[in-house]
Amino acid sequence: MSRILVVEDNALNRDMLTRRLERRGHETLVAVDGHEAIEKARAEQPDIILMDMSLPEVDGWEATRRIKADDALRSIPVIALTAHVMAGDRQRALDVGCDDYEVKPIDFDRLTRKIAALLDS
C-alpha cells in the first residue's frame, strides 16, 4: 500500500492512528514535531503526510508551509489533523498548503477515504 508519515505529538493519538493504518496495510513513519516532520519527509519521501497542526517546536502550519515550499516535497499531499474547528480554520489549513483537513476526534473511515482520494489523484 502506501507510506504515510504521521506527525503527531500526542503518544495515544499517534499510536492509535499508526496501528489502524498498519492494519489497513499501510506502512507508517512517525514524527513528533514539525522539525522532525520536515526532516522525515525529505529523507523518506512518504506518499502522504497526516499533519497535526498543534505541535511543539515548529507547528504544523509552519511545517506544511516549508514542505510545500520545497520543490522536492511539494507534491506530497498533506492532510491537516486538528482540533481547530473555528470558522476559517479549514481555509487557513488550505492556505498554508494542506490538501485536505480532518477534525479531531478523527473519523477514521472518512480519513481513509480522503487518503485514498489524494493518492489516486
Image (spheres, grey):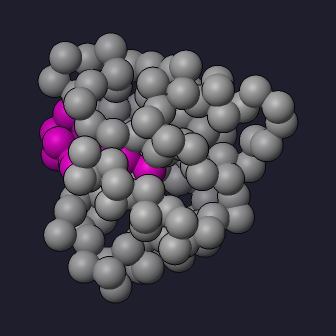
Identify which residue is drawn at 79% across, 43% down: 85
The verdict on residue 46 being magenta is: yes
Identify which residue is drawn at 26% across, 37% down: 76
State which quarter of the image contains the C terminus. Answer: top left
Considering depth in this image, is 90 or 121 the residue closer to the camera? 121
Residue found at the far right of this picture = 86
Count of numbered badges drawn on the protein: 0
Identify which residue is drawn at 59% across, 30% down: 93
The region drawn magenta spans 40-50
**Taking 16 as reference, is 2 above or below it?**
above
Pinpoint residue 70: horizontal percent, then vertical percent: 26, 17
Pinpoint residue 24: horizontal percent, then vertical percent: 32, 81
Identify which residue is drawn at 76% across, 41% down: 84
Considering depth in this image, is 8 or 98 the residue closer to the camera? 98
- Res. 56 image quadrant: top right
Pinpoint residue 50: horizontal percent, then vertical percent: 44, 50
The verdict on residue 58 being magenta is: no
Q: Is residue 21 left or right of residue 2?
A: right
Considering depth in this image, is 118 or 58 the residue closer to the camera? 118
**Taking 100 as reference, is 6 above or below it?**
below
Q: Is residue 33 left or right of residue 44?
A: right
User: Would residue 63 be seen by someone viewing this image from the given angle?
Assistant: no
Pinpoint residue 63: horizontal percent, then vertical percent: 46, 27
User: Would residue 10 be seen by someone viewing this image from the given angle?
Assistant: yes
State which quarter of the image contains the N terminus. Answer: bottom left
